[in-house]
Image: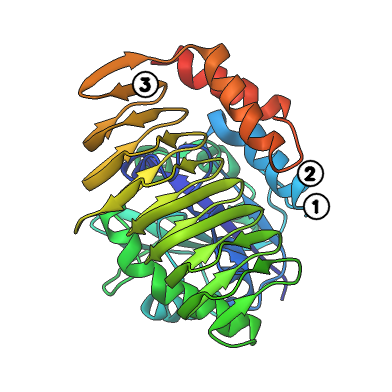
Amino acid sequence: MTMILVLFEDSGCYNLWPLTATMPLYAVKIGPFRVFELWSKLLGIEKVALFCRRGVEEYVDWILNAVDRRNIPVNPDSLDEEILAVNSSYLPLSEALDNARRLRDYKGNVILHRGGRPLMIRASRLIAENLPEALRGVLENELLLSFMGSFEDLPVTGRGEVSSLAEVPGLMEELLVTSLRVRGEGMILVEEGARVEEPVSLKPPVYIGGNVYIEPYTVIISSSIEGPARVGGYIDDSLIGAYSEVMSSRVEKTLLVGANVLGPYSSSTGLDVRAMGFASRVMPSSSLINRALVGITSRVYGVFTGELGSGRVFKWGKVERLHLDNAVEELRKLLLSFGRLPSDYEISYLSEVLERR
């Protein structure tokens, strides 16, 4: 029996802003694999199709198929095999994997849900042919209900569903351990091409991707760093995306989506989660404390807590708007330091975000 593993988004993706502002949670890289790859490898389903919001469709397609050189359909018009569809907010933790394996081998059509929210859909080929209409964009439960006469209804318990950004750091270490086990090279993995200057302290689980530069005297604990990036300071329970710079900083329970800068003497401290969207910056002598969410292209000068929308500048207690030309120029400078320029997709995405403010 052949089967397609399908990943889709529902309105819960908006609860994970700014982590999911530029891409679905299933495309975030934790350790050597993106989340959808973990699902694929752990379930033994090689064929994958991805569905996502219209606003990020072209960007996701570019990242995965042009940059990562995969061949994965994004928002395809049709599904021609039996499917196991997984909500982007359902992570491959142990209980979720048990449910997925049970549904993978299930004979018939069934929706696994929690409180009416679909977390997994097992569908025959005949039913799967009609599902792309519902799965493209953000899944609306009302649209899915039109298909449910052919489905069994299965409530679910157990861990795996992510309902808020604050839950992500607590689950990330378990996902990182799973990702490293799948790779099979130990709980500290430094990819070929990474440069780690001595002395450093690495406390597992730790993943350092290719083309990552780790400065001397850096401490990294239970964190995943995607390359290319430059990192120095104290990093704990954090996820650092590609094209990020963390310089002489203290970073705890922090999610950097990509193309981010935490400047010298900056810090990200406290007991709650902190997240920085794509192309955002925390300037020198500044800090994020407690629950701090910083949107796409935004900048922080000073001590910040709370939520800073996209395209905003927080400067010593005052908030101003950031002009698109300035945002693109800052992104250009950062990416140029890693040897590339912004793509048309990145610039057009920044334009769309700033127009929606």
Q: Which residue is mark 3?
A: 312
Q: Secondary structure at mark 1?
A: loop
- Is any part of residue 292 visible from this angle? yes
Q: Nearer the viewer, residue 160 or 266?
A: 266
Quadrant housing the N terminus: bottom right
Question: Relative to 78, does residue 87 appear above or below in the rendering?
Answer: below
Whole-number angstrom distance, CA of label 3 to CA of label 1: 33 Å
- Amino acid on which disc 1 is placed: Arg
Classify residue 203 by image quadrant: bottom left
Q: Could you tell me if the residues under marks 2 and 1 are in contact, i.e. CB atoms within 8 Å?
A: yes
Graded by Cα atoms within 10 Å as few (under 14), some (14 to 19) or many (20 or more), the crowding at tag 2 reads: few
Q: Which residue is mark 2?
A: 66
Q: Secondary structure at mark 2?
A: helix
Image location (x, y in percent) of residue 290: 19, 49
Q: Which residue is mark 1?
A: 69
- Is any part of residue 151 visible from this angle? no
